Image (cartoon, grey):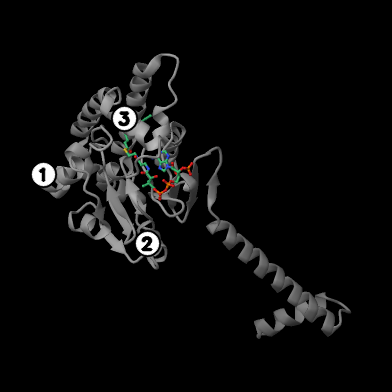
Amino acid sequence: MLDFVKKAKWDAWSSLGSLSKDNARQKYVDLVSSLVSSESSSQVKDTTPDSKHGYETLQVTTTDNITKIMLNRPEKKNAITTQMYREIIQALEEAAKDDSVITVITGNGDYYCSGNDLNNFTNIPSGGIEKMAKDGAVLLENFVKHFIDFPKPLIAVVNGPAVGISVTLLGLFDIVYATDRATFHTPFSELGQSPEGCSSYMFPKIMGLSKANEMLLFNKKLTAGEAYAQGLVTEVFPDWTFEKEVWIRLKAYANLPKNSLALSKQLIRGVEKEKLHAVNCQECELLRERWLSDECMNAIMSFFGKKSKL
Ligand SMILES: CCCCCCC/C=C/C(=O)SCCNC(=O)CCNC(=O)[C@H](O)C(C)(C)COP(=O)(O)OP(=O)(O)OC[C@H]1O[C@@H](n2cnc3c(N)ncnc32)[C@H](O)[C@@H]1OP(=O)(O)O
């Protein structure tokens, strides 16, 4: 009477009535198997990326507290079309509000991004090229604004070469991890254009005036090692371990307290925000003029005539 465990076993066995030992054993095995499989399927569900639909140029997923925005035009080296600018804006707005702790931007394929899709300048609307330049400047200013104002830690996972606006924006990221295969190229004078993404302010601040001038005025393409030495890149990883090492690191970061990270980021970035918005506005105004210049048009025609490549 006083051995409660044995009594519970005896009662359980009695309640099964005439069930044979073999049948009882089988029922027990079935029950445990069903518990194990429901447990493992619920674990799979927890880590399956929550894939966001409705994007044509991006793949957007949230898993392990990380929203990953992947540029997804690998056959065009992830060049950014007007549709992609709009989709990135939308993805950033959603990531700002979702449950994730950090947000990552990366590229699909061998390139991180080849910059602005030069076809953006060939679809002339009915209002003519002035209208095209005006609309382009409005879109660009809004696009960059979303990076300036992004409230959570924003991390670039630079999986290959980066060109143009995909490089200039890096000054607005909180961390930049790069494969040793990555290069960083801002060939604005070669294209008859001028810097954007707040790089005219952030690059001199990050790397000093003369190094910034080599990149922004004289088109110097940096290796990943050089970009790291100049402070544009946080850390460089060998290409063969890049994805593995970076994602292990990011998953650990994404376990940190969400509000603490967001508030600290706002403290660090807050003092510069007004300045950055003013710089963004000036850069877009100058670009609007540059896009109407012969220098810019000749560079674009030369690319499509396959006469030039960066
Ligand atoms: C409306 C808002 C406007 C905001 C503008 C903001 C200002 C932004 C400025 C910039 O970003 S400036 C930088 C612009 N980028 C370029 O000039 C790069 C041009 N591309 C190249 O020089 C080369 O493609 C490359 C990147 C060096 C790669 O060369 P590779 O030989 O390895 O590949 P390709 O065969 O050339 O490329 C494959 C395929 O992709 C097309 N493509 C690549 N990049 C672009 C691009 N930026 N714009 C349009 N198309 C691009 C390339 O033409 C190939 O297409 P197909 O021939 O296969 O059809």
Task: Kindly identify the residue that appears in the image at 78 percent across and 81 percent down.
Answer: 25
Q: On the rendered image, what quadrant is the C terminus found in? A: top left
Residue 51 location (% of width, % of height): 54, 47
Q: Residue 296 sits in which quadrant? A: top left
Tag 3: amino acid: Asn
* Sequence-wise first label, 1 or 2: 1
Q: Mark 1 = which residue?
A: 209
| Between marks 3 and 1 in the image, the one whose residue lies nearer the viewer | 3
Determine if the C-beta at disc 3 is less than 8 A from ligand 1.
no
Residue 266 location (% of width, % of height): 25, 42
Residue 242 is tagged as none
Q: Mark 2 = which residue?
A: 246
| Secondary element at image label 2 | helix
Is the residue marked by circle 1 packed among few (<14), some (14-19), or many (20+) residues within 10 Å?
A: few
Above-or-below relation of 42 to 260:
below
Q: CA–CA distance between discs 2 and 3?
A: 40 Å
* Sequence-wise first label, 2 or 3: 2
Is residue 174 something that shows in the picture?
no
61 or 252: which is nearer to us? 61
Q: On the rendered image, what quadrant is the N terminus found in? A: bottom right
Is the residue marked by circle 3 packed among few (<14), some (14-19), or many (20+) residues within 10 Å?
A: few
Q: Mark 3 = which residue?
A: 298
Residue 250 location (% of width, % of height): 37, 59
Ligand 1's quadrant is: top left
